[in-house]
Image: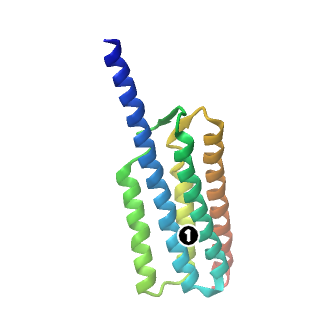
């Protein structure tokens, strides 16, 4: 009986680790999709090339931070809030980003619309508490998640300021 309960516990831990790694990979891929969109904006709107290039580069950094979470979860107690993470929702979000990439490559959209989309992306990540799917006692994990949240807030602020500046020019 003890052996069976140990097997169940071992299975649950492995299952939880696999689930965490899958979620981590989805979150990292999402950051990479956002980076691709920002790179398209940088190529399309040369007047703000540096703005979007810097955001694109930072999104790739965020993806790296997220993947490093996977390494940090090894042998750590980490809980996934299944109610906070919805695979369908993140896939829908990634599909939205992908459609925007296709659209920017096929159509001319106004600069302020691209800036509005950029603000929307960053704001929605914060408002949906995107990086709050994990609960842990690990200080390193908590620090990385806090760093991701702060970096996203900085992106939102930067996008909002740039959007407001260009709206005034219209």
Which image quadrant is residue 140 in?
Answer: top right
Question: Looking at the figure, which quarter contains the C terminus?
Answer: bottom right
Q: Tell me if I can see residue 6 in this picture.
A: yes
Q: How crowded is mark 1: few (under 14 residues within 10 Å), some or many (20 or more)?
A: many
Q: Residue at x 55, y 76 (%)?
A: 39
Is 73 rendered above or below residue 4?
below
Q: Which residue is drawn at 67% across and 79% down?
A: 50
| Secondary structure category for the residue under label 1 | helix
Where is residue 4? Give x, y as percent.
31, 18
Q: Which residue is drawn at 56% across and 62% down?
A: 122
Nearer-the-camera pick, 140 or 129? 140
Which image quadrant is residue 48 in?
Answer: bottom right
Q: Which residue is drawn at 45% across and 53% down?
A: 25
Is 76 rendered above or below residue 40?
above
Nearer-the-camera pick, 160 or 60? 60
Residue matched to label 1: 118
């Amino acid at each position: 009986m003890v052996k069976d309960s140990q097997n169940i516990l071992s299975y649950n831990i492995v299952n939880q680790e696999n689930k965490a790694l899958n979620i981590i990979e989805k979150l990292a891929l999402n950051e990479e999709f956002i980076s691709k969109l920002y790179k398209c904006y940088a190529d399309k709107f040369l007047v703000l090339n540096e703005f979007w290039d810097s955001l694109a580069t930072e999104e790739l950094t965020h993806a790296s931070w997220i993947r490093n979470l996977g390494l940090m979860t090894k042998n750590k107690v980490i809980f996934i809030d299944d109610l906070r993470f919805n695979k369908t929702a993140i896939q829908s979000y990634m599909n939205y980003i992908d459609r925007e990439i296709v659209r920017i490559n096929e159509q001319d959209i106004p600069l302020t619309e691209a800036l509005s989309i950029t603000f929307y992306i960053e704001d929605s990540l914060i408002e949906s508490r995107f990086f709050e799917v994990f609960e842990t006692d690990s200080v390193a994990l908590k620090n990385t998640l806090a760093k991701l949240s702060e970096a996203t807030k900085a992106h939102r602020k930067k996008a909002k300021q740039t959007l407001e500046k260009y709206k005034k020019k219209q």
